[in-house]
Amino acid sequence: MTRTNISFLMRRAFERLVASVAAVALTAMLLVSVDARAATHRTLTPSVTVLVPTVTVLVPSVTIEALD
């Protein structure tokens, strides 16, 4: 019974160790692959275009004619 518990505990410890090493390796690969340097201010070009909507207001007109 004790041997089974030790075997189980050793397997769980190994699984946690492997998971930790894998997480550290993935984090390191991600940090190496990302280029996080900021671009210089002179080379930046605007990437936002502002569109201003136009509104046309139609005012109805009324003509009053005199009756003869």
Image (spheres, rainbow, N blue to C red):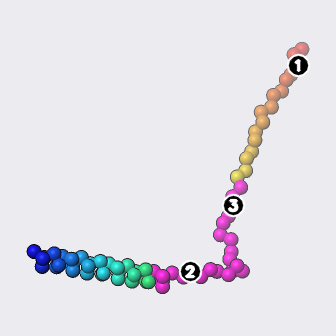
Q: Position of residue 39 (x, y in %)?
A: 64, 80
Pointer 1 local density, CA inside 10 Å: few below 14, some 14–19, many at least 20 = few
Q: Quadrant of residue 30?
A: bottom left
Task: Return the x and y of residue 42 as percentages of the image width and height.
Answer: 72, 80
Give residue 36's mark. 2
Q: Residue at x 80, y 31 (%)?
A: 61
* Dot 2 alpha-carbon crowd within 10 angstroms: few under 14, some 14 to 19, many 20 or more: few
Question: The disc labelled 3 sits on which kind of residue?
Answer: Val
Quadrant where the C terminus is found in the figure: top right
Which residue: 17% across, 78% down? 6
Sequence-wise, the earlier of marks 2 and 1 is 2
Q: Position of residue 2 (x, y in %)?
A: 12, 76
Residue at which label 1 appears = 66
- Span of residues in magenta: 30-52
Q: Amino acid at mark 1?
A: Ala
The residue labelled by disc 3 is: 50
C-alpha distance separating marks 2 and 1? 78 Å
Q: Which mark is residue 13?
A: none
Q: State which mark lies toward you, 1 or 3.
A: 3
* Disc nearest the viewer among 2 and 1: 2
Name the side, left or right, on which 52 lies relative to 18: right
Split into 4 quadrants, where in the image is the N terminus? Answer: bottom left
Q: Indicate whether residue 29 is drawn in magenta.
A: no
Work out how far the residue at label 2 is from the one at label 3, CA to CA, in angstroms.
28 Å
Contact check, label 2 and label 1, Cβ < 8 Å: no
Marks 2 & 3, CB-CB < 8 Å contact: no
Earlier-in-chain disc, 2 versus 3: 2
| Direction left: furthest residue | 1
